[in-house]
Image (tube, grey):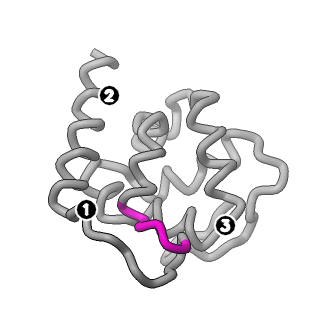
Amino acid sequence: MEASMKNICLLGFVVALVIAGFGEVNGAGECGRANPDMEAFKLAPCASAAQDENASVSSSCCAQVKKLGQNPKCLCAVMLSNTAKSSGIKPEIAMTIPKRCNIADRPVGYQCGAYTLP
């Protein structure tokens, strides 16, 4: 059942990417030249942890969050992206992942839309 849920989430990511399009991003935004919707695809290993606060967070998820967390604006944009939302990600739970990964240098207190990173 868990495997089918991951497949559904992955399918959601792919569908959202198709909807968002694969156009080149010319300006620099929250994630530099990268599109937050495209960057959200890298957080596929976090799908179940971003939907259920009691789900375990995989080491591959933590590694990706740590990378993206080096730029809090980008991490925030990715967690609130249309791709994440259309994949069933719950922002209030996704914001807890850096803490659940025990990332020591996470951006504690960073305001991310209506949410604050713990």
**Which residue was labeled with disc 2?**
6
Residue 29's spot in the image, x, y percent?
50, 80
Read off the magenta span: 32-37
Residue that appears at 47% across and 34% down: 45
Dividing the picture into quarters, in which one does residue 106 lie?
A: bottom right
Marks 1 and 2 sit apart, C-alpha to C-alpha, by 23 Å
Q: Nearer the viewer, residue 33 or 46?
A: 33
Quarter of the rendering containing residue 27? bottom left
Q: How crowded is the residue under tag 3: few (<14 C-alpha within 10 Å), some, or many (20+)?
A: some
Q: Amino acid at mark 3?
A: Asn
Q: Which residue is mark 1?
A: 22
Foreground pick, 58 / 36: 36
Label 3 sits on a secondary structure element that is: loop
Q: Residues within 10 Å of mark 1 (few under 14, many from 20)?
A: few
Mark 3, residue position: 71
**Residue 68 position (above or below residue 57):** below
